[in-house]
Amino acid sequence: MFTGLIEQVGEIGGWEQSGPARRLTIKHEAWGDNGLCVGDSVAVNGACLTAETVAEDHFVCSVLDETVARTSLAGKSAGAHVNLERAMAATARFGGHMVQGHVDAIGHVHDIRQSGGDRVVRIGCPKELMSGIVEKGSVALDGISLTVVGCGDDWFEVHIIPHTWANTALADLTTGDAINIETDIIGKYVQRHLAASAGGTVTEDKLRASGNWVG
């Protein structure tokens, strides 16, 4: 499990095809503590990957076809920046929200605008995912824990404070870019439970009728 608090920005070192498997090299600065061990989980732009080869300044991992299909990683070439977070230790402080590193879908940046010192980013999102995204709820974008400040039928917005913008790969974003979206795990379980209880798909009307709509 992860918290959505980025530890450092790494860089795509390159892709390598080994038979049917894709192998990805991620370059990074030394971690400054115990670093990585073979078998450790690392969220790379929000996608949980396993470090198979480890060195002080890089690690190598295999990338499944499912990960390629579900995330924006395949569109990242050598030199592209990526957000890195190691799996949370049981004794660590929990500062963001519960992030699994299981990307739900790829969104696209519709707009980036300034609001005081912050940036407001509007993300186009598949409609079927929007039932799991609510105003003031949590969402992970490229592995970063953020709070939703507004949403529509197929989009939502987040505010990015200057520190987060400067210290994550979000600083590279431009309109049209793909971005990994992971919705809140608690919301997923609530949706599943309500859908089973209602005998069908969760809708806004059903949530309102059950008293579980927040909006």
Image (cartoon, helix red, strand yellow):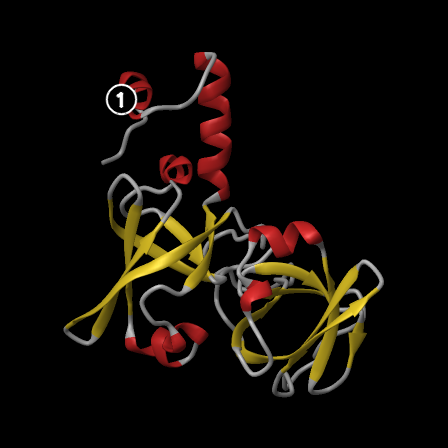
Q: Kindly identify the residue that appears in the image at 45 percent across and 45 percent down.
A: 184
As drawn, the residue found furthest toward the left would be 116
Q: Is residue 116 left or right of residue 158?
A: left
Q: Kindly identify the residue that appears in the image at 37 percent across and 81 percent down.
A: 166
Q: Kindly identify the residue that appears in the image at 29 percent across and 71 percent down.
A: 161
Mark 1 belongs to which amino acid? Arg
Question: At numbered mark 1, what does the secondary structure look like: helix, strand or loop?
Answer: helix
Q: 137 or 79: nearer the eye?
A: 79
Q: Return the x and y of residue 50 as percentages of the image width and height.
A: 73, 63
Q: Is residue 144 left or right of residue 112?
A: right
Picture quarter with the C terminus:
top left
The picture quadrant where one finds residue 158 is bottom left
As drawn, the residue found furthest toward the right would be 19
Q: 203 or 137: nearer the eye?
A: 203
Q: Is residue 35 above or below residue 139?
A: below
| Number of marks present in the image shown | 1
Q: Is residue 77 above or below residue 208?
A: below
Q: Kindly identify the residue that appears in the image at 65 percent across and 87 percent down.
A: 30
Picture quarter with the N terminus:
bottom right
Q: Return the x and y of residue 7 as percentages of the image width and height.
A: 53, 75
Q: Is residue 12 above or below residue 191?
A: below
How dense is the environment of label 1, judged by Cα within 10 Å: few (below 14), some, or many (20 and up)? few
Q: Return the x and y of residue 40 as percentages of the image width and height.
A: 74, 65
Q: Return the x and y of residue 73 as percentages of the image width and height.
A: 57, 64
Q: 122 or 98: nearer the eye?
A: 122
Residue designated by label 1: 208
